[in-house]
């Protein structure tokens, strides 16, 4: 199947969270909300009919009762309204019960998978020396087999990565399988259990300290451990950062030439209309590359009532050695470790240079690494963050304040959000999921196509067309924060400075 039919599985949005136990499609939740409204309207009319009957009972010879069959008509209307209220309530209760049951089943499944992963990780850590010893013969056989295979086929050992790439190219769905995505999520969350098991910590203690317990250990500590091990080798080393405003073209990455002006908020930005919904938010996130701006900032309102949206792009460089690009692998892992990544600090500097005042409402929006930074902005309290939206971000273990309206969009066939581990805590975030390639062929010309910003923009379009009340409420909140008048847009680029 090469085309996706409207309303097919690939168009289905699964909505969960938002302070409730419901997990269901947006269509089901919207239908339940409509039934509740119908029930409320019917009950309101019942009150009015009761008032009419009360008036007629006080004045039995009044003008209403003097009409032919008036009393019977009022009685019939009341009976019909009672049936409508009762039926709509029953149907709404059934839909909500189904959504709650699915939510309980999903949480039980996730809890079981997390617990099993933690136990397996702890056990593998405890048995690591024995497993390493047992692996020696297998590795020896593998190396010998690789050499013999090369002699027989004429292939060199160095061809293996190319063969792996060819296999992935021939099996594109292998990396877009929702089962694999969930497995990766559990494995990432179990890395800390493997480390504690290797250190000899009993499993019950490890469980109590980890994601399933107090949350003192988890993806954050695992990432911090990796960063700590890598830094003595010259890898994953953070540096100071700086930002510049780019509104007149681009130039090579790095500090501006000596004496160059730093306009900051002094120059007027480009006129821009407020974002209309989720598709607009996703579309305005920068597509990051080596020399492109990674941040877009929009300002709305007047001098005394300014509000802001900051759009943050994803990773641009993948070398473990930090270069001039802060949106890199170093920032990815340092951000996961919650140690103030270069990309986070660059966004903070850009917002301050753009003129954001301490009390101004700010809405961070990000994709991939930018989604993680956006969530950390909301969690930090550095700005007056009132709402946040992320697309494909590694945000599962970022604790968000209860007063911040948050919508996190994840594709179930996207590996990247799974690298953030399993969710911890019960905050008010609304999570929207979708399987992009449920019934469509997976593109073979790009890696991890479900993570592409273009696919998240399409999901945003589906969210804008949804009648799910909480999605509509977020769009309405966005409109109240930003207003209807045009604002100004500016682009910003961060770069690393030499670590002196």
Image (cartoon, helix red, strand yellow):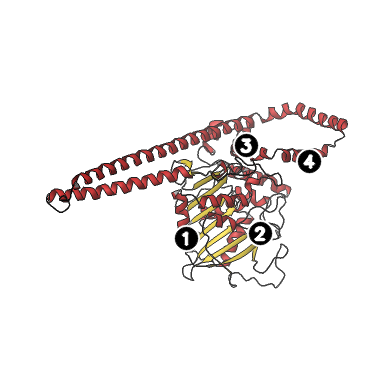
Q: Which residue is mark 2?
A: 240
> CA–CA distance between discs 4 and 1?
50 Å
Expressed as whole percent of the image width and height from the top left, the position of residue 456 reads 59, 50
Q: Is there any visible trace of residue 217 in the rendered image?
A: no
Spot occupied by residue 361 in the image (x, y as percentages of width and height): 48, 61
Q: Secondary structure at mark 2?
A: loop
Q: Which mark is residue 162?
A: 4
Q: Nearer the viewer, residue 137 or 144?
A: 144
Mark 2 or mark 1: which comes first in sequence?
2
CA–CA distance in space, label 2 to label 1: 36 Å
Q: Secondary structure at mark 4?
A: helix
Q: Earlier in the sequence, mark 1 or mark 3?
A: 3
Residue wearing tag 1: 479
Few, some or many residues within 10 Å of mark 4 (<14, 14–19, 20+): few
Label whose residue precedes the other's in the sequence (4 or 1): 4
Mark 3: few, some, or many residues within 10 Å (few <14, many ≥20)? some
- Where residue 354 appears, as percent x and y from the top left, is 57, 67
Q: Secondary structure at mark 1?
A: helix
């Amino acid at each position: 199947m090469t085309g996706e039919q409207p309303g097919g599985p690939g168009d289905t949005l699964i909505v969960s969270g938002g302070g409730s136990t419901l997990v269901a499609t947006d269509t089901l939740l919207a239908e339940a909300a409509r039934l509740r409204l119908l029930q409320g309207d019917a009950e309101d009319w019942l009150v009015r009919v009761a008032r009419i009957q009360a008036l007629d009972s006080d004045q039995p010879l009044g003008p209403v009762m003097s009409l032919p069959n008036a009393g019977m008509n009022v009685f019939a209307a009341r009976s019909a309204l009672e049936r409508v209220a009762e039926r709509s309530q029953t149907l709404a209760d059934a839909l909500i019960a189904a959504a709650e049951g699915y939510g309980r089943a999903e949480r039980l499944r996730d809890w079981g998978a997390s617990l099993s992963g933690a136990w397996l990780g702890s056990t593998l850590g405890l048995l690591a020396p024995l497993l390493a010893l047992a692996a020696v013969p297998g590795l020896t056989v593998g190396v010998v087999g690789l050499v013999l295979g090369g002699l027989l086929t004429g292939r060199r050992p160095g061809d293996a990565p190319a063969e792996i790439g060819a296999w992935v190219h021939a099996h594109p769905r292998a990396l877009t399988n929702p089962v694999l995505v969930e497995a990766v999520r559990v494995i990432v969350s179990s890395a800390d259990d493997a480390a504690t098991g290797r250190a000899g910590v009993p499993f019950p203690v490890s469980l109590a300290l980890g994601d399933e317990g107090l949350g003192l250990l988890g993806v954050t500590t695992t990432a911090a451990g990796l960063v700590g091990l890598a830094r003595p080798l010259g890898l994953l080393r953070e540096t100071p950062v700086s930002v510049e405003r780019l509104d007149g073209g681009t130039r090579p990455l790095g500090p501006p030439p000596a004496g160059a002006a730093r306009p900051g908020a002094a120059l007027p930005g480009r006129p821009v209309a407020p974002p209309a919904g989720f598709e607009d938010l996703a579309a305005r996130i920068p597509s990051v590359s080596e020399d492109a701006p990674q941040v877009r900032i929009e300002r709305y309102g007047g001098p005394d009532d300014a509000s802001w949206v900051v759009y943050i792009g994803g990773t641009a460089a993948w070398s473990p050695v930090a270069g001039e690009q802060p949106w890199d692998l170093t920032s990815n892992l340092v951000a996961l470790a919650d140690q103030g990544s270069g990309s986070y600090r660059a966004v903070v500097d850009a917002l301050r240079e753009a003129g954001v005042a301490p009390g101004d409402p700010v809405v961070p929006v990000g994709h991939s690494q930018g989604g993680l930074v956006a969530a950390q902005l909301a969690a930090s309290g550095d700005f007056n963050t009132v709402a946040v939206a992320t697309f494909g971000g590694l945000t599962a273990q970022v604790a968000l304040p209860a007063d911040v309206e948050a919508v996190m969009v994840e594709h179930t066939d996207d590996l990247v959000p799974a690298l953030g581990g399993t969710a911890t805590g019960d905050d008010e975030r609304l999570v929207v999921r979708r399987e992009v390639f449920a019934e469509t062929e997976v593109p073979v010309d790009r890696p991890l196509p479900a993570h592409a910003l273009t696919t998240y923009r399409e999901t945003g379009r589906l969210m804008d067309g949804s009648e799910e009340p909480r999605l509509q409420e977020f769009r309405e909140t966005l409109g109240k924060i930003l207003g209807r008048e045009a604002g100004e847009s500016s682009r910003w680029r961060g770069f690393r400075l030499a670590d002196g």
